[in-house]
Image (cartoon, rainbow, N blue to C red):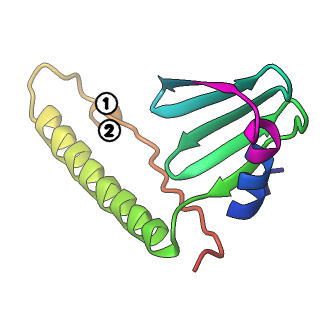
């Protein structure tokens, strides 16, 4: 189960590792996620992954993953509405492609109903952000 925390808890966990000591920061982009590592010799390592405004983080001192949602409620609603618009456009494209393929003489009868089968889901994550 995901444990969601406040911005203050996120900052405190990060400060516990890097505050007052020398650290090296490593950043990488992997699968559209920003991955950061803050390494210290004295306090261990702090890890964070940023994806779609949600920060997942943990450290050598606290191994369990925790999450901080950086998005506002308005951004979440806007992102959800954009995903619905994208879903509608995709359904329209698939429908048009199926109509065009059914008219193609090279397709054997009986296959026309299974030219393109897609399962499309839209997900929205809600938070109590104000």
Q: Quadrant of residue 89?
A: bottom left
Sort mark 1 into few (<14), some (14-19) or many (20+) by Cα contacts within 10 Å.
few
Q: Which of 21 and 124 is in front in this view?
A: 21
| Whether residue 120 is situated above or below residue 109 in the rendered picture | below
Mark 1 in CB contact with mark 2 (< 8 angstroms): yes
Query: Which residue does the image show at 70% across and 32% down from the upper left?
Result: 47
Query: Which residue does the image show at 46% across and 44% down from the upper left?
Result: 119
Give the number of the disc on residue 110.
Answer: 1
Q: Which of 85 and 95 is in front in this view?
A: 85
The answer to whether residue 6 shows anywhere in this view is no
Tell me where the magenta segment starts and ends, as one range. 15-25
Left of 27 or right of it: where is 127?
A: right
Closer to the eye: label 1 or 2: 2
Residue bearing the label numbered 2: 113
Left of 67 or right of it: where is 73?
A: left
| Whether residue 35 is situated above or below residue 73 in the rendered picture | above
Residue 80 at what x, y percent from top left?
Answer: 44, 64
Residue 62 at what x, y percent from top left?
Answer: 89, 39
Query: Which residue does the image show at 76% across and 24% down from the upper left?
Result: 40
């Amino acid at each position: 189960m995901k444990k969601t925390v406040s911005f203050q808890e996120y900052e405190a966990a990060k400060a516990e590792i890097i505050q007052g000591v020398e650290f090296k920061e490593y950043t990488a982009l992997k699968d559209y996620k920003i991955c950061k590592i803050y390494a210290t010799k004295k306090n261990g390592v702090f890890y964070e992954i940023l994806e779609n405004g949600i920060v997942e983080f943990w450290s050598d001192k606290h191994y369990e993953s925790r999450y901080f949602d950086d998005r506002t409620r308005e951004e979440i609603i806007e992102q959800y509405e954009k995903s619905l618009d994208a879903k509608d456009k995709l359904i329209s494209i698939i429908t048009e492609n199926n109509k065009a393929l059914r008219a193609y003489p090279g397709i054997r009868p009986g296959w026309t109903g299974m030219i393109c089968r897609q399962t499309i889901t839209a997900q929205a994550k809600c938070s109590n952000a104000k």
